[in-house]
Amino acid sequence: MKTDGKLMKMLTGYAASHRHPLNVFVHMIGIPTIMLGVLIPLTWVTVALNDFHFSLGHVLVVALFVFYLTLDTLFAVVFLVGGLLLEMLTAKLGAYPGHSGWVLAALLFFGGYAAQFIGHAVEKSMPVLVEHPIQANLAAPFFTVVELFHIMGLRDDLFKEVQRQTEALQRQDAV
């Protein structure tokens, strides 16, 4: 396992500000909730190429998948499956009559972000979103997949190395 690459740097940085179990739990709920809020209006814009139809929601999920492939293939594939399932759900949610889709999208989007800030208040750490909003939004869905693996006890060697490097960084910062 490579321990000095972009993936390890990202995971170590993420782990340093997501140690409290409540904050991790809130992120596991909040990030997919935000994605639902973003994807609902994106499913309304569709493109047809011959008999193939896709939405901007599909484009976003596939674009994130391609980016995540540069980090880790297994995590990227799991994200793709989950992301496409979320896109299918949002297409149904966005089809509610009237302004229901917009209201639901706004509630999910802002509610998910509110949860993130509450989680970081408990953690007593500044959300990455505040300093690096683009980076935070690109990486957050990936971290949700990574955290699922961690919760399920998969790829323990990776998480042990993340823990080791995080503790080393904290010791270095304390000096």
Image (cartoon, rainbow, N blue to C red):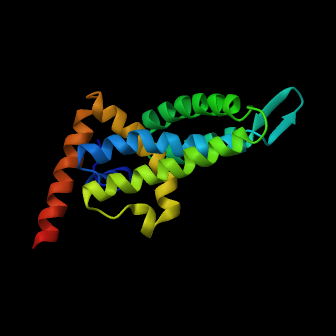
Q: Residue at x 34, y 32 (%)?
A: 149
Residue depicted at x 39% and y 57%: 117
Q: Considering the image in quadrants, where does the C terminus appear?
A: bottom left
Residue at screen point 36% across, 44% down: 26
Q: Position of residue 114 (x, y in %)?
A: 45, 53
**Quadrant housing residue 24:** top left
**Does residue 113 show up?**
yes
Residue 8 vs residue 44, the one in the foreground:
44
Extreme right residue here?
A: 50
Q: Is residue 142 above or below residue 154?
A: below
Q: Residue 81: x, y in percent? A: 54, 28
Q: Is residue 64 visible?
A: no
Q: Nearer the viewer, residue 151 or 122?
A: 122
Residue 103: x and y in percent read: 66, 45
Residue drawn 51% across the image and 55% down it = 137
Residue closest to the eye, 118 or 160: 118
Residue 25 as seen in the image, left or right of residue 76: left
Q: Spot the residue most to the bottom.
A: 175
Q: Say which quadrant the N terminus sits in.
A: top left
Above or below, 157 relative to 7: above
